[in-house]
Amino acid sequence: MTVEQPAIDDLDARLILELQQEPRLGVMELARRLGVARGTANARLEKLQRSGIIAGFGPDIGLAPLGYPVMAFTTLEVNQGRSEGLVEKLRAVPEVLEVHTIAGQGDLIIRVVARSNEHLFAVLEDVLAAPEISRTSTAIVLAEHIGYRTGPLVETFQD
C-alpha cells in the first residue's frame, strides 16, 4: 500500500490560514508572521498558486447584503445523453452559482440564489424550461449553520 505525501506541510498550512484570516496581507508581513524570509514566503505562495491549492484572492461576497437572501439547492434529472448543452445553459443564468454532477438520485445539483421566493420561482422556471431536464427537486435553505469553509481542513496539515 502506497501512502501519498501530504499536498502541503505545516508552513504552507500556516501561510494559507494567515491569508484566510487576512486576504490582503502583503508578502513582507506574511513572512514576518510566519517567521521566515520574504523569499521563502513568496516562493511558498507561488507554489501554492501554481498547484491550484490557492485558487484565488477574490473577495467573499455576502449574498444577502447584495440583494439575494434566498438560496436553494435543486437536483436535476437529465434525459440520457443530453447534459452537455445543459451545463452551458445553466452557466448563462447569473443566479446559478454552482453546478455539480452527482451520484445517487439526480444527475446534477445546482445552487441558486434569488431576491425573493417569487424571483426564485421565476429563475427555476427559466432553468426548468430546458428540454434536457426530465425531473427536479428543490430544497430552499432556511438557515446557514456552517458556510463554505476550508480552514479546519487546512489545520489538519499543521504539526
Image (cartoon, helix red, strand yellow):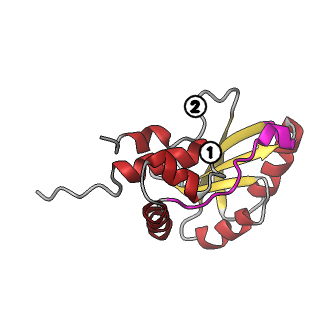
What secondary structure is the magenta-colored segment mainly? loop
Q: Residue at x 60, y 67 (%)?
A: 83
In the displayed structure, 99 sits above or below 157; it is below
Q: How many discs appear?
A: 2
According to the picture, the residue beneath numbered tag 2 turns out to be: 146
Which SS class for mark 1? loop
In the displayed structure, 157 sits above or below 92; it is above
Within-10-Å neighbours for mark 1: few <14, some 14–19, many 20+: few
Q: The disc labelled 2 sits on which kind of residue?
A: Ile
Q: Residue at x 65, y 66 (%)?
A: 87
29 or 129, which lies in front?
29
Q: Position of residue 52 (x, y in %)?
A: 48, 65
Q: Is residue 122 left or right of residue 38?
A: right
Q: The disc labelled 1 sits on which kind of residue?
A: Glu
Task: Check residue 139 in the rendering and tell me which mark sits there, or answer none.
Answer: none
- The residue segment tinted magenta is 54-69
According to the picture, the residue beneath numbered tag 1 turns out to be: 22
24 or 156, which lies in front?
24
The Cα atoms of the two marked residues, 1 and 2, are separated by 20 Å
Q: Residue at x 35, y 55 (%)?
A: 8
103 or 152, which lies in front?
152
Q: Residue at x 34, y 48 (%)?
A: 10
Q: Position of residue 151 (x, y in %)?
A: 49, 41
Within-10-Å neighbours for mark 2: few <14, some 14–19, many 20+: few
Q: Position of residue 28 (x, y in %)?
A: 56, 57
